[in-house]
Structures are given as structure tokens and as C-alpha cells.
Image (cartoon, grey):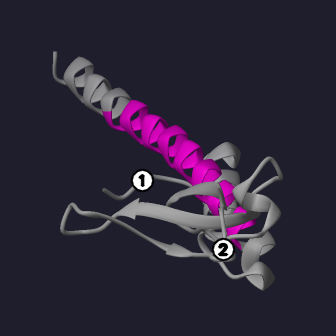
């Protein structure tokens, strides 16, 4: 729906932040696991700590099935940053959607008042 005039500053700021975050956002939930290896005499099979952490990202696919992928060590920081960007992106989109809702409702109220 076209708007009259320039969008408010907060809306422009949100749109700018959303564009920046969309370049790095990664959808999913990050989890860390620790595992025992296949060497029976290794410390991880007794009282010693397990190997890890190993990072995995899980998410619901477009078909509705939970799936995921293992994160290579070299990509851990980028994936963590991308998942945090996704969370922030969702919050900003909700705020923008609320602003859009209010704008549309205000316009409808103004038109209704104008016609009465």
C-alpha cells in the first residue's frame, strides 16, 4: 500500500538494519554436544570429559521436518553470529509489522472520520 510522504525515521532505521542483518542471518537453533569416541581406552569412556563441543544447527524444513547440519570449526563464529542476526531480524520485523499495522489502522480511522 503506497504511503504519502517519507517514512518515519524509525521505519527507515528498521529497514536499514533488516537489510544488513539479512546478509548474514542463519535460520536454526544452535546446540553443542559432547561425545565419546571409538577408542575404548580413551579417557572419554571413563571419568574423563567427553570430546567436543561439536556444534550443530537444527531447523524445520519447508516440508515441516526437523533437519540440521554440523558446523565446521572454521565456521563456528560466523554461524553463531548468523543465528543471533536471525533472532534480531525477527524482533525488528515484528516491530516494523506493528508500525505498519498502526499506520494502516490510523489511515482507516482517518478515512472513516472524514466520511462521517
Q: Relative to residue 40, is residue 98 depicted above or below?
A: above
Instruction: Tell whether position 92 is magenta.
Output: yes
Q: Circle 2 is placed at which residue position?
A: 24
- The structure residue drawn at horizontal position 64% and vertical position 57%, both measured from the top left corner, is 33
Q: What secondary structure is marked by label 2?
A: loop
- Indicate which disc, 1 or 2, sits on the residue closer to the N terminus: 1
Q: In this view of the protein, which residue sits in the foreground, 91 or 54?
A: 54
- The structure residue drawn at horizontal position 41% and vertical position 61%, both measured from the top left corner, is 59
Q: Which image quarter: residue 51?
A: bottom right
Q: In this view of the protein, which residue sits in the foreground, 41 or 71?
A: 41
Q: How many marks?
A: 2
- The structure residue drawn at horizontal position 49% and vertical position 37%, both measured from the top left corner, is 99
Q: Circle 1 is placed at which residue position?
A: 3
Q: Relative to residue 22, is residue 99 depicted above or below?
A: above
Does the image show residue 19?
yes
Residue 106 in the image: state x and y as whole percent: 37, 28
Does the image show residue 7?
no
> Over which residues does the magenta segment extend?
79-104
Residue 67 badge: none
Residue 58 in the image: state x and y as whole percent: 46, 62
Residue 97 in the image: state x and y as whole percent: 43, 43
- The structure residue drawn at horizontal position 31% and vertical position 29%, both measured from the top left corner, is 105
Instruction: Tell whether position 80 is magenta.
Output: yes
- For disc 2, the neighbor class at 10 Å (few under 14, some 14 to 19, many from 20) is some
- Left or right: 31 as drawn, with respect to 48: left
Amino acid at each position: 500500500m503506497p504511503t504519502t510522504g517519507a517514512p518515519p525515521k524509525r521505519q527507515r532505521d528498521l529497514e536499514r538494519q533488516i537489510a544488513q542483518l539479512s546478509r548474514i542471518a542463519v535460520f536454526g537453533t544452535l546446540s553443542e554436544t559432547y561425545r565419546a569416541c571409538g577408542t575404548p581406552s580413551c579417557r572419554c569412556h571413563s571419568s574423563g570429559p567427553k570430546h567436543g563441543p561439536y556444534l550443530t544447527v537444527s531447523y524445520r524444513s519447508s516440508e515441516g521436518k526437523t533437519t540440521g547440519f554440523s558446523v565446521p570449526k572454521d565456521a563456528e563464529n560466523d554461524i553463531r553470529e548468523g543465528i543471533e542476526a536471525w533472532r534480531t531480524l525477527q524482533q525488528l520485523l515484528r516491530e516494523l509489522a506493528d508500525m505498519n499495522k498502526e499506520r494502516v489502522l490510523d489511515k482507516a480511522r482517518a478515512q472513516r472520520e472524514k466520511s462521517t
